[in-house]
Amino acid sequence: MIIKIAILFSTLLFAYFKLSSNNYLLQEQPVVGVFTQPSTFSEYSRDNYTYIAASYVKFLESGGARVIPIPYEANYSTLDEIFSNINGILIPGGSTGLIGPSLYTQKVAYLVNKALKINKEGGWFPVIGICLGHEVMHYILSNYSANFLIDVKGQDKVTKPINIQYRQAYFYGQMNEELYQASLKENLAYYHHIHAVSPSLYEIAPILKQYLRITSTQIDDDEQLFITSTDGINIPFYSFQYHPEKNPFEWTIPANHSLHAIQFSRIHSYQFIQSCRMNTNKFSLDLNSLIFNYNPVQPVNQNYNQVYIFHRLNTMEDQELQNP
């Protein structure tokens, strides 16, 4: 109990000084931008359509935020406009190519680096990456290390516990003792990946140690250690190899829907949106740009109950290979 109170006090104290030193008022109507990706659905050609899984939208809304799509193929001026109107970014999971860096990686990097600059200068701009998002954040922050991923075995559509390495982490520090113990012992975390980030990347690309702290790990079927979560070091960057959005909102996959699994997910959504509330941007775009203007559909692909489908933008003012 004493440890939990100390963790809670230190978290609140940090937030207090952050708010006081910047004269922040908590944002009561946070808006989070979510990156789209090329369609992976047979009925929607990747050349013409992009998508966001509805579970990410519900995940953010359950924490108290509204959502706006960030078209990954948008030009840089459009990305700038969206960035100045949102309070945080979610980089979702998926199967989009990253290496190159790819166009997708370039556009994600453009906004991640804008957020990083704001945070370095004493501002506050949260970014959360889930699965592929976790991986691309490491790719970007490692200055595009060629060795940023390892192949892992037995992590596709499975649930496992997590090995928490840092109890005081922004998300795990808010767990009561019952949920914390459940996270260590029960299969609360859903994994759907064939690649992962090894802790050894932090030795290959030591610049990562300036930005991220490893907060939990897991091993694959070949006993390979990989990172399952990170916290930003003095910046509100967060990443997870597992999928906290799956437990409450996806029902066609073997995600855990137990009480502890739902509480585990809720900690992630609530804490991330609390961080977004500390950003001072005000939304002034057309309300029709919010996700409410779109209707989710049920895809043939049964990894998702629902997805949002978008027509790919036809024009790009910037060169696709522009250096982010």
Image (cartoon, rainbow, N blue to C red):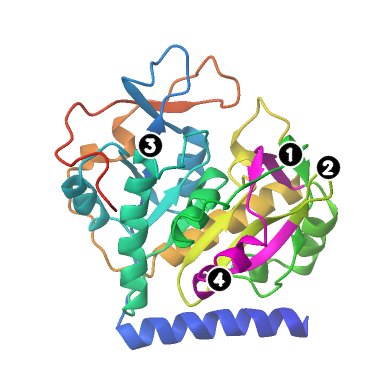
| Dot placed on the residue nearer the N-terminal end, 3 or 1 | 3
Alpha-carbon span between mark 4 and mark 2: 27 Å
Determine whether 88 is above or below 59 in the image: below
Characterize the local packing of mark 3: few (<14), some (14-19) or many (20 or more) Cα atoms within 10 angstroms.
Answer: many
- For the point 20% across and 42% down, the residue is 75
Residue at the disc numbered 2: 221
Characterize the local packing of mark 2: few (<14), some (14-19) or many (20 or more) Cα atoms within 10 angstroms.
Answer: few
User: Do labels 1 and 4 touch, CB within 8 Å?
Assistant: no
Q: Amino acid at mark 1?
A: Gln
Find numbered disc 3 in the image and state the secondary structure of the residue it sits on.
loop
Decide whether residue 215 is among the magenta residues.
yes
Q: Seen in the image, is 310 located left or right of residue 286?
A: right
Residue at the disc numbered 1: 155
Alpha-carbon span between mark 1 and mark 4: 27 Å
Q: Seen in the image, is 138 located left or right of residue 244?
A: left
Residue 55 percent coordinates (x, y): 52, 37
Q: Amino acid at mark 2?
A: Asp
- For the point 19% across and 52% down, the residue is 81
Span colored in magenta: 188-217
Residue 189 percent coordinates (x, y): 71, 47
Find numbered disc 1 in the image and state the secondary structure of the residue it sits on.
loop
Residue at the disc numbered 4: 206
